[in-house]
């Protein structure tokens, strides 16, 4: 059975790194990898293939930049072409990016079954392009691999119980990755030896594209760095551009985007994480670090409910206060929330049982 996997952004490389290994170990499964090029520079893309041992993409596009519609449309056209030439039995997509939606749409229109890894997540904020992508992808998928019971329950509320689509709880492949690659983690040389620091990431359009929110976050991180604990910020290229355009000045310690293994080292050694990323919220938990989430909603509500993460939006005072409080918080992971590292094998076995 031939699986076509579409990836294009950092979180998808990490997820595919372990799922592709599980597919390769499963008799009867063959994988074709399509890389859209959505994340295209060496640190945002190629480094993940190099470090995680991902198979070289069978098809590599160069689709990045432009509006959401333009990017998705170009991806749709090229993915449709490789579906025609490679004739997959199933299309597998990850997460909630433009690459995700384009892969799912192209397959659905050509009557190729779609498997969606990380299905059922909702932020309930339709202003987020990711929310639109994940809802549309779920609704045209034939098998929905849910990372949490919350995601399964959400799809049930949306009526998926009455649809022919197959909904499965498999656990979170991000935890598989964290456990698989943690021993290979390498601290970036420019921050080696730093202790008790806050690891920060900022890249969401809801923050970077709104000057008031971006200014509040920059102010808060500067304050934390000055008054609470050192802040290390791997600076996303687009965030760097938006900060410069807004005339803001970062006082924290910035470094270039790092590879996955370096980021794992930062997660292992930090005191806590301040982020607006979806995946990093969970990665912090995998390493039992508290998370200060600089968003108004989160897909990972279970982490807020159990006290591991706190939502602070873009409120500068709240970001500083919750960061100060979280420095002394103890986080425990008993493996029950995200599967304990078994998700990849569950996905491979389910694909074989469903489509082979």
Image: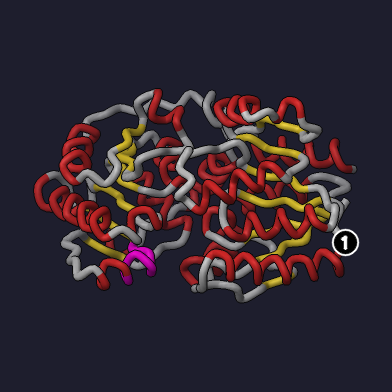
- The quadrant of the picture occupied by the C terminus is top right
Residue 129 placement (x, y as % from top left): 50, 53
User: What is the crowding at mark 1: few (fewer than 14 residues within 10 Å), some, or many (at least 20)?
Assistant: some
Total count of labels: 1
| Location of residue 86 (image quadrant) | bottom right
Residue at x 34% of width, y 61% of height: 209
Report the side of 335 relative to 93 (left or right): left
Depth check, front residue: 222 or 199: 222
User: Would you say residue 339 is visible in this rendering?
Assistant: no
Residue 198, compared with residue 6, is above or below; it is above
Instruction: Determine which quarter of the picture holds residue 152.
Output: top right
Q: Is residue 41 found left or right of 318 in the rendered image?
A: right
Q: Position of residue 343 (x, y in %)?
A: 65, 36
Residue extent of the magenta highlight: 235-241
Q: Residue at x 71, y 31 (%)?
A: 167
- Image x and y of residue 319, in percent: 22, 42
255 or 25: nearer the viewer: 255
Q: Residue at x 34, y 64 (%)?
A: 239
The answer to which of 276 and 55 lies nearer the viewer is: 276
Residue receiving disc 1: 87
Which residue is farthest left? 227
- In the rendered structure, the answer to whether residue 2 lies left or right of residue 166 reads right
Does residue 181 appear in the picture of this structure? yes
Question: Magenta: predominant secondary structure element?
Answer: helix
The residue depicted at 48 percent of the width and 56 percent of the height is: 260
Horizontal side of residue 342 vs 290, given as left or right:
right
SS under mark 1 = loop
Scheme of colours in the image: secondary structure
Q: Position of residue 267 (x, y in %)?
A: 37, 46
């Amino acid at each position: 059975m031939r699986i076509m996997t579409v990836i294009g952004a950092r979180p998808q490389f990490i997820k595919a790194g372990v799922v592709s290994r599980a597919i390769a170990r499963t008799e009867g499964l063959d994988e074709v990898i399509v890389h859209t090029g959505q994340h295209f520079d060496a640190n945002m893309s190629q480094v993940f293939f190099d470090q995680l041992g991902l198979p070289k993409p069978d098809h590599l596009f160069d689709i990045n930049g432009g509006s959401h519609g333009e990017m998705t449309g170009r991806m749709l056209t090229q993915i449709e072409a490789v579906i025609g030439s490679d004739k997959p039995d199933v299309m597998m997509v990850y997460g909630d990016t433009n690459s995700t939606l384009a892969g799912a749409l192209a397959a659905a229109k050509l009557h190729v079954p779609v498997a969606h890894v990380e299905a059922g997540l909702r932020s309930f904020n339709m202003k987020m392009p990711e929310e639109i992508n994940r809802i549309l992808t779920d609704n045209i998928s034939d098998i929905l691999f849910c990372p949490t019971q919350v995601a399964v329950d959400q799809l049930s509320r949306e009526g998926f119980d009455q649809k022919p689509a197959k909904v499965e709880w498999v656990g979170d492949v991000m935890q598989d990755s964290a456990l698989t690659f943690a021993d290979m983690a390498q601290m970036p040389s420019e921050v080696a030896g730093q202790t008790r620091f806050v690891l920060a990431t900022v890249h969401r359009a809801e923050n970077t594209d709104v000057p008031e929110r971006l200014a509040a976050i920059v102010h808060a991180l500067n304050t934390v760095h000055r008054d609470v604990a050192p802040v290390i910020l791997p600076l996303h290229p687009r965030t760097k551009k938006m900060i410069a355009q807004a005339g803001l000045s970062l006082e924290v310690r910035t470094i270039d985007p790092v590879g996955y293994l370096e980021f794992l080292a930062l997660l292992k050694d930090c005191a806590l994480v301040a982020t607006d990323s979806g995946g990093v919220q969970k990665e912090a938990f995998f390493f039992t670090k508290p998370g200060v989430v600089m968003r108004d909603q989160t897909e990972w509500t279970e982490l807020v409910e159990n006290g591991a993460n706190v939502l602070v939006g873009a409120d500068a005072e709240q970001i500083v206060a919750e960061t100060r409080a979280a420095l002394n918080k103890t986080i425990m992971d008993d493996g029950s929330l995200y599967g304990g590292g078994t998700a990849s094998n569950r996905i491979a076995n389910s694909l074989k049982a469903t489509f082979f």
